[in-house]
Amino acid sequence: MGSRMNTILQVCFFAISKILPGEEAIEAIRKSIRDTYGRKGEDIVQKNMQAVDETLAHLFEVKVPTELSSTIAMPPPFSLDAPAFERDVLGVMYAGRGDELPVSAFPIDGTFPTGTAKWEKRNLALEIPAWDEKICIQCGKCAMVCPHAVIRMKVYDSKELVGAPATFKSTESRDKEWKGLKYTLQVAPEDCTGCGICVEICPVKNKSEARLKAINMVPQPPLRMPERENWDFFLKLPEHYRRDIKVNTIRQQQIQEPLFEFSGACAGCGETPYLKLMSQLFGDRSVIANATGCSSIYGGNLPTTPWSKNAEGRGPAWSNSLFEDNAEFGLGFRLSIDKQTEFAQELVKRLSAAIGEELATALVTASQKDEAEIYEQRQRVDLLKEKLQGNNSPDARQLLSVADYLVKKSVWIVGGDGWAYDIGYGGLDHVLASGRNVNVLVLDTEVYSNTGGQASKSTPRGAVAKFAAGGKPGCKKDLGLMAMSYGNVYVASVAMGAKDEHTLKAFLEAEAYNGPSLIIAYSHCIAHGINMTTGMSDQKVAVESGQWLLYRYHPERAEQGENPLILDSRTPTRKVKDFMEMETRFKMLTKSSPEHAQQLWREAQQDAESRFRLYEYLAQRKTEKAPV
Ligand SMILES: Cc1ncc(C[n+]2csc(CCOP(=O)(O)OP(=O)(O)O)c2C)c(N)n1
Ligand code: SF4
Ligand code: SF4
Ligand code: SF4
């Protein structure tokens, strides 16, 4: 039964309480199993029936001692090493004693520190991954897909290994550019959820033992203490200079520090790997507007947040707005940041004599197109601040207050499909049409996940969801195509599990584009009725069958006379049926209404074929350079 305990507990309750005569209660439970799970298929019904039998067979009385005999002392909710606010306020809330806190304990402006999920140490997993450094090819794929940012990679000088714990693993880096450096892949043992996605994605098979890979699940309890020590040591190893990392290849990019870690999303969530990737690439300069939905809950689930900061104290500034206005909320960030940047530049020009012409010109003209240039601009801003010290003119004081806006900020507007396709669509459309430089990330689970799986306009034909109990009769709305019709919006449709390098490329292009960008990211979800461990490989089948398309529409290509649309999906090699059969959301209709299911599955196949033909046509169309 995995983690599904309801049937087992129900049987225990009725067997012990004897509220109803034993046999009568058990028969009623069996009937309710048929009524509840019948639509999901005989397999699930039988699993539950078996759980009833096994529960009855194994039920035994546990004598509760009259006195406590345990010698285990409960550790404090958050480590004593946590900063005071985290330990004494957030930790108390975490322990469920928040009502003991006085109002004066809270920040008066409502802001909360970030990077606090790391104190939870939930120890959820019975098994965690163990790394086999001898056969690992250092591809970075396991780190990329980890929904909880638990698997990390670092490259570092061998002298850093002085004082390493006895079981700390490291090997030679295989990357030519990191020749001579050491490489470690480390798991945070107490933050892992045991979802197994990292093992599933690892491409390396152990030749001497076929069932093993370069990373394998092993029991957590014996590893907890030694790996905790290893993790702490790993954290102290220096981060590689961001400006020296080639961000366009996963093997290097994945050593970037995630600034979104240990979220409380479901184990194996399909949404969070995208947010983690975004936080690695742009987190040190990003401002995030988050629509209501799963991402706002695991993103800001009081008392902790997974949004984090690096050693320099830089990390995403995050806020959640209403479901219905989040795109506008994010546009507001963009407008106010641009205004402050403009003001800072104006002041730099006005004060150029005091600052020095050369520095002033560099500060206002820097293109900041990559990590190295952003680093240089940060250095200039530090120098500027130094030069302004002791200058008490009103202009200098104002410039000091806005100087940080001279460094590029990356605005992200994030939400689910319920937000983007339905309730927030009017605002999203308005923001895309504005032409402003914002990045929109739609975490597309094809249902309203956070409220239990209601159908949205993104739900594909034939999927059973709440408000679509008979299978969604209509096809999925093509949000990407609608956005492309503006011509000046960068649009990408991605699925990390199908092509991780493509996802990475789309994130880089979207952010670099000086205009509105929309990334629609396929996100597997518990609402799909799947085995979450294989969520990423399911995404592959979605793409291979044409159920999900991979493409990028880049307005700058049109400016150069090229077709702006690149269809990155190949001609489907499988049928949509192959994908639908893997997911209970589709399969359940074949039990409850087989003929109707057949009809909808046929139509779903037609949807996929006509969508592919349309995109193929659009991507092959010759375009002419627009007259100047
Ligand atoms: C105007 C409004 N209607 C309904 C809700 C309740 N609500 C909160 S989260 C949510 C579902 C969000 O679904 P989606 O946008 O698809 O994001 P996901 O949870 O799938 O990530 C709903 C309906 C709300 N907060 N505001
Ligand atoms: S098992 Fe899941 S949470 Fe743990 S490291 Fe692997 S992908 Fe991350
Ligand atoms: S996916 Fe496998 S081979 Fe690749 S880095 Fe992870 S453990 Fe190594
Ligand atoms: S319900 Fe789905 S989207 Fe939400 S946290 Fe769980 S897996 Fe992720």
Image: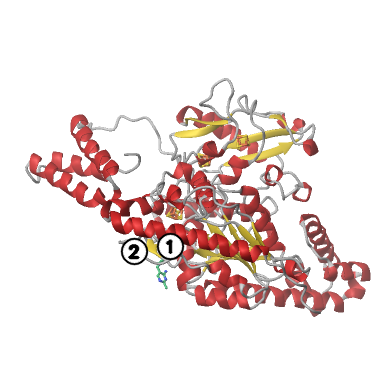
Q: Residue furthest left?
A: 21
On screen, residue 365 versus residue 553, left or right, reads right
Q: Badge 2, how many Cα within 10 Å: few under 14, some, many 20+? A: some
Q: Residue furthest top?
A: 208
Q: Amino acid at mark 2?
A: Ala
Q: Is mark 1 within 8 Å of ligand 1?
A: no
On screen, residue 582 versus residue 414, left or right, reads left
- State the residue in front, 534 or 540: 540
Image point 58% across, 32% down: which residue?
229
Task: Decide if residue 591 is in sight here.
Answer: yes
Look at mark 1 in the image and give the residue it sits on.
Answer: 459
Across and down, in percent, residue 577 comes to: 42, 50
| Mark 2 or mark 1, earlier in chain | 1
Give the spatial CA distance, label 2 vs label 1.
Answer: 9 Å
Image point 28% across, 51% down: which residue?
591
Q: On the rendered image, what quadrant is the N terminus found in?
A: top left
Q: Secondary structure at mark 1?
A: loop
Give residue 237's quadrant in the image: top right
Q: On the rendered image, what quadrant is the C terminus found in?
A: bottom right
> Does 548 appear above or below 467?
above
Q: Badge 1, how many Cα within 10 Å: few under 14, some, many 20+? A: many
Task: Decide if residue 491 is in sight here.
Answer: no
> Does 173 appear above or below 511?
above
Q: Is mark 2 within 8 Å of ligand 1?
A: no
Across and down, in percent, residue 557 comes to: 74, 66
Across and down, in percent, residue 59 comes to: 20, 32
Look at mark 2 in the image and give the residue it sits on.
Answer: 468
Image point 53% across, 71% down: which residue?
326
Q: Are marks 2 and 1 in contact (CB under 8 Å)?
A: yes
Q: Secondary structure at mark 2?
A: loop
Across and down, in percent, residue 140 comes to: 64, 40
